[in-house]
Image: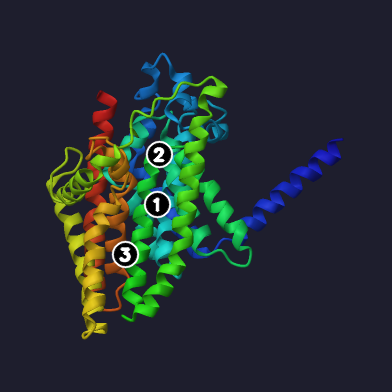
Amino acid sequence: MNERALLIRSDWREDLLKLWQRIPVDWKKAFIAAMLINIIVYFFDLAQFPLGDHDVGYEDGIPLLSGGRTGRWFTPFLHLLSGHVQIPVYTQLLAFATQIAAGMGAVLLWRPKAGAWLLFAGGIMVSCMPAVTDFYYYHYMSLAFTASQLFMVLALHASLKPGRHRLLSYALAVVLTTCALASYQSSIMTWTTCFWGLVLIKLLEWDGRLSALYVLCKALCPALLCLMAACLLYAVSLRLYPLVGFSLDLYQFQTVVFTDLPQRLWELVRQSWLHLVVPQGFMSLWLKILLLCALAGGAAAMLSRAVHVTQRQLLKVSIFIVAIALFPVAAKSQFLVSNNSNWYLYRFLAMGLSYVYSFFLLTLLADSKTPIRNAGLLLFILLLPCMAVNCLDQQIRHVRS
């Protein structure tokens, strides 16, 4: 019996080793480096746990942990990783890992051949944005916040790069998206932001012909169909709640009345653009300015490429400008269907707008022109300490509260 147990354990270790060896070296370098940065940036939170554990004050912690009344029925499965117990440091490290992986996955979606440097920058921009500290304030939900984003990014990969087993890939995309919604509904903003970033990349490669635009739309359609199927499946799952004895309270996702959609759409566009310039309490003025520089610089670099390549193709340039203008709107897509008025809620920024900033910074870092690339590098060097200081300030505020 002991020999058999040792043999099983040995096989398990060998399988893990083989899996580790199959991961590209650049991925491992970027992930480990980003993980170390996250541990440094969020060390205060790690050291204070569980003294600053927000869920200690809840008497109904078990229903919240299970996600029962908020439609987050996949959360208990995530908590199996920690045995439904908030284990100091370990639980947070899992959240760091999934948040970084989501950021790196987004980079690979936009730039499949990205090296360690771009993967590291993308992982850091998504995981060290000051708004992310809000995830770690709610320790009992931190893994749901981060894992839901990773599920959405993986779902996009599965739906857009199906390979030989197309139907299985689509089915996997639907399941992953459903699990993401059932972990934290606002992760829909991660999907729309990453998807819209890919649309911009494809439009930049578009030659301006309508026939080629049709082919592009056809290639992107499976992702949209998988999203629609997942939303329908999730809606059906919520209908089953009374059958298992759960009450339902989607307090952050009350749907908009159909007749109010035009007004809601206008408000969505207005608030999305305002969010880029309106100061927030969790961001210093310097950080806000640097992020705006990254956004404006990346957009200008992409637009100059589009104009340079297609000087006579007014249609492409016009569509591309509109697509860039809609990018911040995609980062707040939840608010089109939800009548939630918390436009600037920290968690919502981390779910969507942080990916927008990451996308445009990567545009600068990956540019073929050295001056633009150097400007991107300088911005990243300035951004990292600014984000770290803002994150520390937020951690101190959380613990004191």
Estimate the x, y position of residue 72 in percent, counting from the top left. Answer: 46, 32
In the figure, 68 relative to 376: above or below? Answer: above
Q: Residue at x 24, y 50 (%)?
A: 385
The quadrant of the picture occupied by the N terminus is top right
Distance in Å between CA atoms under marks 3 and 1: 18 Å
N-terminal of the two: label 2 or label 1? Answer: 2
Q: Is residue 286 left or right of residue 145?
A: left
Q: Badge 3: how crowded within 10 Å, few (<14), some, or many (20+)?
A: many
Distance in Å between CA atoms under marks 3 and 2: 27 Å
- Residue 82, picture quadrant: top right
Estimate the x, y position of residue 124 in percent, counting from the top left. Answer: 35, 53
The disc label shown at residue 185, or none? 2
Name the amino acid, label 1.
Trp
In the figure, 295 relative to 339: above or below? Answer: below
Q: Secondary structure at mark 3?
A: helix
Q: Secondary structure at mark 2?
A: helix
Q: How is the image coloured?
A: rainbow
Name the amino acid, label 3.
Leu
Distance in Å between CA atoms under marks 2 and 1: 11 Å
Q: Which residue is mark 3?
A: 362
Q: Residue at x 63, y 63 (%)?
A: 165
Q: Which residue is mark 1?
A: 191
In the figure, 188 relative to 236: above or below? Answer: below
Estimate the x, y position of residue 132 in percent, counting from the top left. Answer: 32, 41
